[in-house]
Image (tube, rainbow, N blue to C red):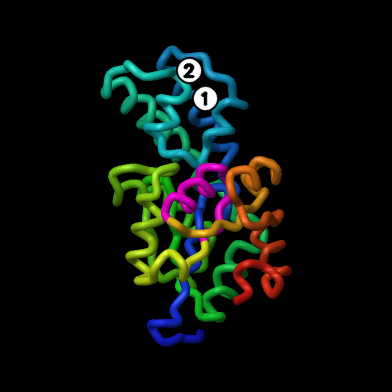
Amino acid sequence: MTTPPPEQARAAIIDVDGTLVDSTYFHTVAWWEAFRQAGHKVATRDIHRLIGMSGGHLVERLIGPGHSEEHVSAISDAHATLFGTWHDRLQPVPGAADLLRALARRGWRVVLATSARGHDLKAMLGTIDADDAILATTDSDQVDAGKPAPDLVEAALREARVPPNRAHFVGDSVWDVVSAGRAGVDCTALLSGGVSAAELKEAGAVAVYDTPGDLLAHLDTSPLAA
């Protein structure tokens, strides 16, 4: 593994849900059931479009403001419990571990930045099975505001000890692209979360690939080639 001098250090900040782990649709179904249990009818397509956003923002966007903190927390907690039942069935997106290891070998400081809670992140890290390539992780338990706020990306920058212009984000949702942009970091997007290339490019993605494996296959001509 290459170790560049501090002034040449680069960080690859990478989302987890939908980017490295095939979990987006499990989250969609878990949120749908959590809303149903709380008495709300919400279409799965509307939920899917907001996956990647922090839980609090997602709930408010789907049922509107004005609900008590206890009600919102109950929905989020129900989602967490329901999603937890899928932990042992999660699978990595093709090429996930290989991409992380390839970036680490090239000297990138690999930091994961996810809106997931800590216990979900732990399960997904086991699914990816590439701890040897990961410098650090940041999750929703560590910041005041999740995506699309820039807090997670900024926390990842601090972990990597690099400025925004020495980092690059890889994610799968519009909210990943927006969060990275607000932190001053360019974002390459993947289609593995079910969001269209057009939407990702409109949000500001500098490049779009199918999966981590596809990005790895084109790494030498990608924004992460430098």
The disc at residue 32 is 1
Q: Which residue is mark 2?
A: 36
Cα distance, mark 1 to mark 2? Answer: 6 Å
Q: Amino acid at mark 1?
A: Trp
Q: Position of residue 113 (x, y in %)?
A: 43, 55
99 to 45, vertically: above or below? below
Q: Amino acid at mark 2?
A: Arg
Q: Residue at 63% across / 43% down in the picture?
A: 202
Q: Are marks 1 and 2 in contact (CB under 8 Å)?
A: yes
Residue 162's x, y, as percent? 39, 71
Q: Secondary structure at mark 2?
A: helix
Specify whether residue 122 is painted magenta: no
Please name the residue shown 47% across and 37% down the image: 83
Residue 135 in which image quadrant: bottom left
Camera-side residue: 54 or 181? 181
Is residue 41 toward the left or the right of residue 226 in the image? Answer: left
